[in-house]
Image (cartoon, grey):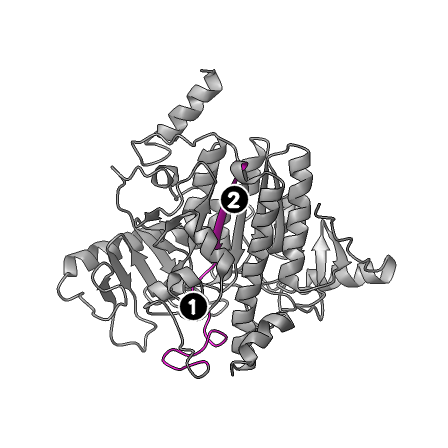
């Protein structure tokens, strides 16, 4: 055994780095990595999750061929989750307390996932949504990504009175995309374009025998709810409204693109050396997905998988998402993990998998490799924290500490009131016996609630000094507008050359 191999084994087993006594056999194995994250899809709209009418054959096949985390928890909205994936710690500690108004900018003091992977020889590419800062220092090409193919803001065409804005007048079909710092004009639906770009880059890395991390972050099915015509038509023909047809049409289009991805991985003989993770960034969005308790069309009921809450809430339905992990021949297909896991666990898991060292004094998440290998013994319980944030710009965050928050451990969800006007106070739910959160048991378990609230108070005190964007002035310009106009007026916006996927 080499000295490096011995060190990797010691790190993988160390209780100081990973709170686990069991060594992971996959540590340091260095596969290629593809992380697909969808926007606002949430847990319910997948056939294998019991959805009664949605058609997702490729997601269903991925479900069957993966180890699945049944209780994978993220943030209630997008930028917070994405920052936690990138840093391995809860969003507030990354300076993220909103999705706009300069409070979506991930602190520049963090060492993020592509930078970690670069230390062990990986090249990283992002395709789709970044949403962690649109000013130059915050862009992914300044933070470790070697290939960037992205839109701005939190969605194609979005623009706010701050730096958070996409290229002007951008659209889901034929979007203008910022490719390695230069805008290009693409042709086709955005999700199709992102997957095509990712596949082209993956093929380049594979041909060069270069280990890679591909971060495929669709902005679908986020609103506006616009799907390719053929995908939307299936639902409008059934009597769905335009927005609902757009939402579910986008989900089925994502499914088609996953089918393309896996077909190419097989064709290029990459499946046996590529770990694929599929997840979403927050709970299912309301509106586009329908209205709870109301049919979308005759015989087509609204479906939320028996959960309480949607995107933007601190209930389980606001933060629970699918997490499928597939690696042919290495990770057991069909296995389900009931232990809670979270966005903060992605970085330490991938660091362990690749043999990369963790950033000093940053990571709160855990290496999930032991769970993926079926080694459950000795896995200690823990607390995960959620806060919606989004208080008014310039307000004192401490005045909002005890509202719109939640604490989760393996058994319980402790949920704070919605605001000063919510006289019901906090609630406690036993998620084992009452996963739909129908019965508040706080009066029966006051000690549990007190322990969870105390843990949350400690977390807040740690996070508060790291909320570095609270006093940030609004940017006087929209960088994507400025860069687009400068390029258009000088060299123009060239057509994107779609890669040949052979």
Q: Residue at x 35, y 55 (%)?
A: 385
Looking at the image, is 215 positioned above or below residue 391? above
Note whether residue 400 is visible.
Answer: yes
In this picture, residue 458 sits left or right of residue 451: right
Note whether residue 367 is visible.
Answer: no
Residue 228 included in the magenta stretch of the image: no
Q: Which range is magenta?
A: 273-296
Mark 1 in CB contact with mark 2 (< 8 angstroms): no
Percent x, y for residue 237?
A: 56, 81
In this picture, residue 130 sits left or right of residue 299: right
Residue under numbered circle 1:
312
Percent x, y for residue 33?
A: 54, 41
In-front residue for pair 417/412: 412
Q: Residue at x 36, y 70 (%)?
A: 309
Q: Residue furthest right?
A: 490
Residue under numbered circle 2:
110
Percent x, y for residue 405?
A: 34, 63
Q: Secondary structure at mark 1?
A: loop
Residue 283 included in the magenta stretch of the image: yes
* Quarter location, residue 494: bottom right
Q: Main secondary structure of the magenta part?
A: loop
Q: Residues within 10 Å of mark 1 (few under 14, many from 20)?
A: many
Q: Residue at x 37, y 48 (%)?
A: 334
Q: Quadrant of the N terminus?
A: top left
Looking at the image, is 350 positioned above or below residue 240? above
């Amino acid at each position: 055994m080499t000295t490096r191999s011995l060190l990797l084994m010691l790190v993988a087993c160390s209780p100081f780095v990973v709170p686990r006594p069991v060594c992971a056999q996959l540590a340091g194995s260095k596969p290629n990595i593809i992380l697909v994250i969808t926007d606002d899809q949430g847990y319910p709209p997948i056939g294998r999750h019991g959805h009664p009418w949605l058609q997702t054959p490729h997601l269903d096949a991925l479900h069957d061929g993966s180890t699945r985390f049944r209780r994978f928890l993220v943030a209630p909205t997008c930028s917070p989750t994405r920052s936690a994936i990138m840093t391995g710690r809860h969003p507030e500690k990354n300076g993220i307390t909103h999705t706009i108004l300069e409070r979506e900018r991930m602190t520049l003091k963090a060492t993020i996932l592509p930078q970690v992977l670069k230390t062990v020889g990986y090249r990283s590419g992002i395709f789709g949504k970044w949403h962690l800062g649109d000013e130059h220092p915050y862009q992914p090409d300044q933070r470790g990504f070697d290939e960037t193919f992205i839109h701005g803001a939190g969605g194609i065409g979005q623009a706010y009175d701050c730096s958070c804005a996409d290229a002007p007048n951008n659209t889901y079909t034929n979007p203008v995309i910022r490719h390695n710092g230069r805008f290009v004009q693409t042709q086709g639906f955005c999700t199709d374009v992102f997957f095509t770009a990712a596949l082209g880059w993956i093929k380049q890395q594979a041909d060069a025998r270069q280990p890679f991390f591909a971060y495929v972050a669709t902005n679908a099915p986020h609103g506006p709810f616009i799907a390719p015509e053929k995908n939307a038509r299936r639902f409008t023909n059934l009597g769905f409204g335009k927005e609902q047809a757009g939402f579910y049409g986008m989900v089925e289009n994502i499914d088609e693109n996953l089918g393309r991805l896996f077909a190419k991985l097989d064709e290029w003989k990459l499946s046996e050396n590529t770990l694929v993770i599929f997840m979403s960034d927050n709970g299912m969005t309301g509106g586009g997905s329908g209205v709870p308790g109301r049919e979308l069309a005759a015989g087509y009921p609204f479906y939320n998988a028996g959960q309480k809450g949607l995107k933007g809430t601190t209930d389980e339905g606001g933060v629970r998402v699918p997490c499928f992990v597939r690696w042919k021949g290495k990770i057991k297909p069909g296995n389900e993990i009931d232990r809670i896991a979270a966005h903060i666990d992605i970085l330490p898991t991938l660091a362990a998998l690749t043999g990369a060292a963790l950033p000093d004094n940053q990571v709160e998440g855990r290496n999930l490799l032991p769970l993926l290998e079926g080694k459950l013994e000795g896995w200690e319980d823990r607390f995960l924290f959620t806060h919606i944030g989004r208080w008014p710009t310039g307000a004192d965050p401490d005045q909002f500490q005890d509202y719109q928050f939640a604490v989760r451990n393996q058994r319980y969800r402790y949920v704070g009131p919605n605001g000063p006007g919510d006289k019901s106070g906090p609630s406690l739910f036993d998620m084992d016996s009452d996963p739909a959160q129908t019965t508040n048991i706080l009066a029966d378990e006051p000690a549990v609630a007190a322990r969870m609230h105390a843990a949350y108070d400690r977390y807040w005190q740690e996070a508060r000094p790291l909320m570095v964007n609270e006093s940030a002035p609004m940017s006087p310009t929209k960088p994507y507008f400025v860069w687009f106009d400068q390029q258009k007026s000088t060299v123009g916006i060239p057509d994107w050359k779609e890669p040949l996927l052979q």
